Image (cartoon, grey):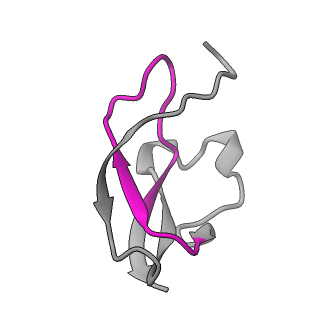
Amino acid sequence: MAGRCWAETWVNHHGHHGSEATRGILVKEEKDHAILKGLEDGAIFGPTDVYTVKLPLPGDSKPLVLGEVVAG
């Protein structure tokens, strides 16, 4: 279903809650996706830790950016 947002239950946690952050890493096969235009690895940053979800995602959803735990 194009345009539909899916909420996925996380299955694992990476990093130490409240003391680490997340650096966005573009999925290599998706780096030319229109949503990612002009972005490079590390251009997306979040002050939170990283969670794992079960892949594949439901429907036609696909990950575009993965999270890498960094000191934050």
Vertical side of 35 occupied by 4: above or below:
above
Choose between 54 and 27: the one closer to the eye.
Answer: 54
Q: Position of residue 24 (x, y in %)?
A: 52, 64
* Residue 19, percent from left and from top: 44, 84
Judge from the rendering whether residue 43 lies leftward or rightward of residue 63; answer left or right.
Answer: right
Q: Residue at x 69, y 44 (%)?
A: 35
Q: Position of residue 51 (x, y in %)?
A: 38, 55
Is 61 contained in the magenta span?
yes
The residue sitting at the front extreme is 18
Q: Which residues are magenta?
A: 46-67
* Residue depicted at x 52% and y 45%: 64
Residue at (59, 71) in percent of width and height? 45
For the point 34% across and 77% down, the residue is 16
Picture quarter with the N terminus: top right
Q: Is residue 7 above or below residue 71?
A: above
Q: Nearer the viewer, residue 47 or 59?
A: 47
Q: Main secondary structure of the magenta part?
A: loop
Q: Is residue 36 left or right of residue 15?
A: right
Q: Residue furthest left?
A: 12
Residue 6 appears in which quarter of the rendering?
top right
Image mark count: 0
Question: In the image, residue 52 lies at what x, y percent?
Answer: 34, 50
42 to 27, vertically: above or below = below
Task: Between residue 48 and residue 40, name the one nearer to us.
Answer: 48
Answer with the quarter of the image where residue 56 lies. Answer: top left
Is residue 48 located in the magenta-colored stretch of the structure?
yes
